[in-house]
Every structure is written in C-alpha cells, then in structure tokens.
Amino acid sequence: MSQKIATDSDIKDHSLAAQGALRIEWASREMPVLQVIGERFAREKPLQGVRISACLHITTETANLALTLKKGGADLVLCASNPLSTQDDVAAALVKEQGMPVYAIRGEDNQTYYQHVHAALNFKPDITLDDGADLVTTLHKERRDLINNVLGGMEETTTGVIRLKSMERAGKLEYPIIAVNEAQTKHLFDNRYGTGQSTIDGITRATNILWAAKKVIILGYGWCGRGIAMRARGLGAQVIVIEVDPIRALEAVMEGYQVMPLLEAAKIGDVFITVTGGLNAIDKPHLDLMKDGAVVANSGHFNVEINIPVLEGMATTKRQMRPNVFEYTLSDGRRLYLLAEGRLINLAAAEGHPASVMDMSFANQALCAEYVASLKEKLAPRVYPVSQEIDREVGRLKLLSMGITIDKLTPEQGQYLDSWEGGT
C-alpha cells in the first residue's frame, strides 16, 4: 500500500487506484492551461497552508484541478457534489497515490452524501469550492461555527449561482463567493460545448438510440440548452425548444429551432432533456401526454427537474432495462423511460465534460483560489464575478496551448476606443 494513502477517507475500493491514476494522467493531456498554472504554482506556492474543502464531481478533470491546487501548497479535501457522478477509481487514486482525503462513493444514498459533505467541512476550510452550493448552504445552516474562518469560495454551476444569489438577496450569505460559472471562459465553452457533447454522449451510452429523425425536446435554452440543441441537430434530430423567457425563446427561433409550449411538445417528443435549473419542469400534465416509448433525461444539476415522485405514482410496474434506464409502465399501457434516476445524465451514464473544456473552467477555479488567498482584507459577503483579468488570462493561455496567436490593438486604436471625443 502506498505510503501517501489518506487514512481519513470514505471511498469504494482502494484497489482501483492504479486504474484511476492512468485515467487522471490521460485527462491531463487535454488540460494544458492547468498544467501551465500548476508549474507556476509549484514554484510560487501561492496557496501554501490554505485549507480547501471542495464539493465537486469526483472525475478525472476534477482530480487535475485538485493536483494543481496541491502544487500551489493547498491542503485539500474532496467530497462528491452528486451521488451518481463519482468515478470510484479516481477517488481511489487521489486517496492512495496522492494522500488526499476524499469522501465520495458512486451511488451513495442521500444520508451518506450529506455525511460526506459534513466530513469535508470538518476540515475547517479557508476556501470552499462548490458545484451546486450544497457545501455552502450546509455550512450556513448547520455548521455556522466555521463561517468566520472562511476567506471566500467559488461556485461552478448555474444552479449553484442561482442559490447563492438568492442567499445574498435574503441577507443570508456570510462570506464572499466568486461565481466561476459566470466567467466567459466557463459558460461559453463548458456549458455550451461541454454539456452539449456530454449530454448527448450520456443518453447515447444509456440507450443506444439513433438521433437522426428523433424529435428531441429541450427544456431550457440557456448556455447548456444551446449546446445540447446544437449537438442534437448536428446528429440529425428535429429539435424543439421549450422556454419561459421570451428573449431566449426568440433566440431559439432565430437559430432555426421550433419553439412551443411543453403541453404541445409532450404529445410528439421522442426524447425529453431538462436543463432549466428549476423544479418540476416535466410534471404530471406532460407525462400524461407523452407517447409510448418516450425517453426522459435531465442534465440540470439536481434531480428535481422531472417530477419523479409523480411518475412513480403513475406507474403500475417499474423495471430496469439497461444500466441507467428504468421503464415505467402506466395504467394505459404506455411505457416511459427515465434515465439515470433523473440525475445528471452526462455524469451518471458517461464521463462528464471532455477534459479540454474543463481545462478552462478549472483554470478559473485555480486562479480564483489564488486571488482569494492573496487578499489582504476579506471581501464583503456577496456573489462576485470572475475578474476580466483572470477570464482573459485563461482565454490567452488556452489559445497559446493551441498554437494560436491573435492581434493586439495599437496604442492609437486603444486610445480611440477609450475616448468619447472622436466622431465622423
């Protein structure tokens, strides 16, 4: 057994470590921005002695973020941000090969999930990293004795940012959070290209369907919805968008998609994908109208976008047809297929986002952690954007890693853009 093993952890199987280490190394090949940051962190140690508790998807990409933060001197503990997103071999590699405490087991029940969140908080963090805001909300509701020690945190997801902004409006947020999700190098790429590809990948692996000619109903046309719609159309699907925001709906129309109420789309859809960040986007009236054989999946953060208790109540029988595919037979004989228990289909049935796109998202995380640790005074308890300087640096490093150079403004051009005096 490795001498680095972290004894205070809860994972599935230490024997998976070698396999996990190889997969972490493979992902690192597609994460050159993190590598550059990691090399600088190793020299400068900007996070020396900083304690970080991270509630993230335990994947190969997250492991590379964790290793980058460790190179910077951070003491790090990880727990899962979703019961079905943990890659058990990755967790084992971090524990056994890196001596990093990890509390994450794929398929853990809700009670174990929150026990693991509390275990990560027991680390008494200076900085929190969150993916969905469960760590932050648990800390605020149940572990308030730790709040004064926290310098700040980062949030990775749209769902988490929504929760945190709600906390801020209610006056309940007690330390500063940087909304990494709002960085352009995050949502323009991770949410659109990452979610787009990985969602289609997850549904394909779970069902082996042919996308061509399928009527694919996408609930929500934010950056994630845009990405899924783009990828589904690229595979020949007939894409229909459901929206409650008139501007987003108009954008979808201008992009060439059909837009209609879900009560109309429910009658004709073959595959339904929720990415709303909201509650019960698919509810009983919609389930009542779906045709025999309809497939329902979620790619939003929490498993509340599909009203699963209602579906359970409607079903006369339920059986597992394939991994991550449950068949619900209704009283009228229709069969509806729920994927991955309504949890994140791209992580439950596939491997999540490609490492290349997570390279940018996690580069933002690493640089924001450095920024928070460098502050001389604690920021006011608000949700902050990623600084334009960090965002552009991530974009610059990504282009550099791709061998791409771009132009710069001349001093004259810069002065013109900064001046109000020029005209016709």
Image (cartoon, grey):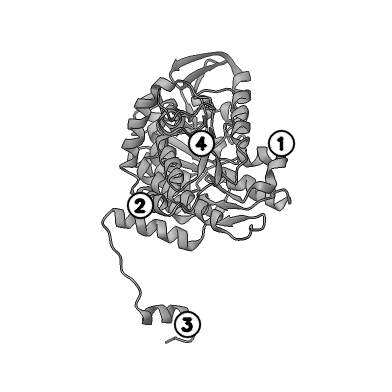
For marks 1 and 2, the one nearer the N-term is: 2
Instruction: Please tell me whether mark 2 or mark 4 is closer to you in this view.
Output: 2
Instruction: Please tell me whether mark 1 or mark 3 is closer to you in this view.
Output: 1
Label 1 sits on residue: 142
Measured Cα–Cα span from mark 2 to mark 4: 47 Å
Instruction: Please tell me whether mark 4 or mark 3 is closer to you in this view.
Output: 3
For marks 2 and 3, the one nearer the N-term is: 2
For marks 4 and 1, the one nearer the N-term is: 1
- 331 lies above or below 243: above
Secondary structure state at the residue bearing disc 4: helix
- 286 lies above or below 164: above
- 91 lies above or below 137: above
Secondary structure state at the residue bearing disc 3: loop
- Closest to the observer, 203 or 409: 409
Three-letter residue code for mark 3: Ser
Label 3 sits on residue: 419
The label shown at residue 265 is: 4
Residue 315 sits in which quadrant?
A: top right
Three-letter residue code for mark 4: Ala
Measured Cα–Cα span from mark 2 to mark 3: 36 Å
Q: Measuring 60% from the left and 46% from the top, which residue is drawn there?
A: 126
Measured Cα–Cα span from mark 1 to mark 3: 52 Å
The label shown at residue 424 is: none
